[in-house]
């Protein structure tokens, strides 16, 4: 066998093994030299890799577990989209690079993606214009309410209140308050939808707008949405659509056609970006024509010759809401997802999401109390009230699910249902997964009857067992367990 190179100063074929080039300590000026050990942990690569791999295995994620976390749309996100987001032509572009130079196109493609995405989202929601700048749902809400405020200010109106249903997401009142408004809560009726008498009582010339999720957090489409929007517009107020539940109506209904003036979407819920843990998201905001001039700058505009540029000359704009154009990779994934699925695919998303939710709901009916027992859209709420009488609360059922390899649904939300367990299976789950979940939920309902005490020991499969929630929130040492 012929050696390719020898271990010698000069190899047979001119190769020699490189030696490590470590600077001599004495070659550094004395004042930079350390006297003792740095005290940094010394770990080998396999030790570090094992540590983080084991940590990741202790976690629940959509790629590893069923994750029916109501309100959050934890669906599987195709890995193909991650590849698109990593394409160098997008990932290596700097936002300050010139948009167009003679003989080159530079950031034209990146601008075209934003332009096209804004138009596709407008089409999907029935709005006239979009901004992609906001970086989360709540950030979109804040942007939307600021647009509302700019609109009313421009008209010279002094308006003080934003109305929010009691089933609304907690971020709604927070966003409205940060934008300078006072909140009026509107009660839902026993059917889980907005109470029209309460709405009429709350509405006045001082109302700036109504923020509402449709379908609402109980998974119910507001049957009187047209009447609601007429009443709100009747006092000169605006309709705000919290689009976090868009997965339920994709391709079926458009907020713009239902009378809404402003919408935000959660691209990280509906349009294929994994989320959780505060990761990058995007909450683009769409508006009707009369609000377009207030949208954040800059705006991507298409010239007659087909080139794109960023327009800053918008005197009525609320200004920047984030640096540059938002979370670009999230926008890119949403754009690719929409192109991948097309119109038919988007319709299938909502149809299957709704079918999966109704399937589980119908099969759990005999075992749990269901406050709104009729059909639902993409999610629904059951109550553990019956089980609570035996001492088994919603939180106990959630903990038991962890042991059975299922991420717990959202519990104790919405606030208008006692012992609420909010289930959203999403469209990406198989019949087998749904059946397994149903079987486990039935098993737990039976266990609550037979042996309620046993729930106190769940979860058994986590390293620390049952956490003391208050202590976990206050005592940072627990984070190292
Ligand atoms: C998730 C959610 C929000 C907030 O979105 P973030 O991206 O988490 O800020 C707002 N409203 C509803 C109904 C939601 O489900």
Image (spheres, rainbow, N blue to C red):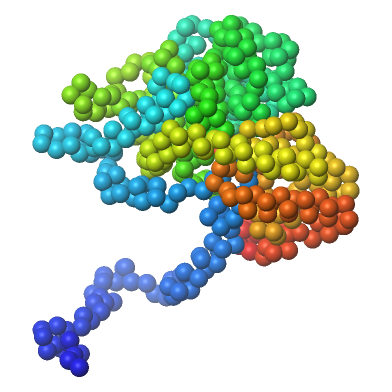
Residue name at image x 69 percent, y 10 percent: 200
- 377 or 156, which is in the foreground? 377
The picture quadrant where one finds residue 359 is top right
Q: Position of residue 51 (x, y in %)?
A: 52, 68
In the rendering, at what x and y percent does residue 348 appear?
Answer: 51, 37
Q: Is residue 3 visible?
A: yes
Say which quadrant the N terminus sits in: bottom left
34 vs 420, nearest the viewer: 420
Instruction: Say if 215 sits above or below 150 in the image.
Output: below
> Splitting the image into 4 quarters, where does residue 12 fall?
bottom left
Give the residue drawn at x 28%, y 33%: 112
Q: Quadrant of ligand 1?
A: top right
Left or right: residue 22 versus residue 194 is: left
Count of numbered labels shown in the rendering: 0
User: Front-most of 481 and 211?
Assistant: 211
Asked whether residue 327 appears in the rendered view, the answer is: no
Residue 235 to residue 362: above or below: above
Residue at 42 percent of width and 39 percent of height? 341
Q: Looking at the picture, does residue 135 appear above or below residue 317?
A: below
Residue at figure coordinates x 59%, y 55% from the top left: 65
State left or right for residue 26 relative to residue 472: left
Where is the C terminus found, in terms of image quarters? bottom right
- Residue 182: x %, y % from top left: 62, 19
């Amino acid at each position: 066998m012929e050696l390719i190179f020898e271990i010698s100063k000069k190899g047979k074929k001119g190769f020699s093994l490189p030696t490590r080039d470590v600077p001599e300590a004495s070659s550094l000026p004395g004042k930079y030299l350390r006297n003792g050990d740095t005290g940094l942990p010394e770990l080998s690569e396999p030790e570090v890799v094992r540590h983080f791999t084991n940590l990741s295995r202790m976690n629940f994620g959509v790629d590893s577990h069923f994750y029916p976390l109501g309100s959050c749309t934890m669906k599987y996100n195709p890995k193909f989209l991650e590849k698109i987001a990593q394409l160098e032509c997008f990932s290596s572009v700097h936002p300050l690079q010139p948009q167009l130079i003679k003989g080159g196109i530079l950031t034209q493609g990146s601008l075209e993606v934003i332009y096209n995405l804004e138009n596709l989202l407008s089409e999907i929601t029935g709005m006239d214009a979009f901004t992609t700048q906001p970086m989360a749902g709540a950030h979109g809400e804040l942007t939307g309410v600021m647009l509302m405020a700019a609109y009313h200010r421009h008209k010279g109106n002094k308006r003080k209140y934003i109305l929010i249903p009691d089933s609304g997401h907690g971020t709604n009142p927070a966003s409205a308050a940060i934008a300078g408004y006072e909140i009026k809560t509107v009660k839902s009726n026993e059917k889980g939808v907005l109470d029209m008498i309460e709405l009429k009582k709350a509405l006045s010339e001082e109302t700036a707008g109504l923020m509402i999720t449709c379908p609402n957090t109980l998974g119910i489409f507001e049957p009187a949405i047209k009447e609601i929007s007429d009443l709100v517009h009747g006092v000169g107020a605006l309709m705000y659509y919290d689009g976090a539940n868009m997965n339920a109506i994709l391709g079926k209904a458009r907020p713009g056609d239902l009378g809404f003036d402003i919408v935000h979407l959660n691209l990280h819920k509906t349009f294929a970006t994994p989320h959780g843990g505060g990761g990058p998201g995007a909450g683009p905001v769409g508006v009707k024509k009369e609000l377009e001039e207030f949208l954040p700058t800059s705006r991507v505009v298409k010239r007659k010759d087909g080139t794109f540029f960023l327009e800053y000359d918008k005197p009525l704009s609320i200004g920047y809401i984030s640096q540059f154009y938002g979370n670009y990779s999230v926008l890119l994934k949403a754009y690719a997802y929409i192109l991948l699925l097309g119109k038919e695919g988007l319709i299938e998303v909502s149809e299957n999401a709704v079918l999966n939710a109704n399937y589980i709901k119908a099969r759990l009916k005999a075992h749990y109390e269901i406050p709104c027992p009729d059909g639902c859209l993409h999610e629904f709420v059951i109550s553990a009230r019956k089980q609570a009488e035996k001492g088994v609360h919603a939180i106990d059922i959630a903990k038991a699910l962890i042991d059975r390899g299922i991420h717990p649904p959202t519990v104790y939300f919405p606030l208008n249902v006692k012992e609420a367990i909010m289930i959203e299976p999403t469209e990406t789950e198989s019949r087998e997964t749904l059946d397994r979940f149903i079987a486990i939920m039935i098993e737990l309902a039976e266990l609550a009857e037979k042996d309620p005490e046993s729930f106190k020991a769940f979860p058994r499969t986590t390293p620390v067992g049952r956490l003391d929630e208050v202590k976990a929130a206050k005592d940072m040492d627990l984070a190292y367990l």
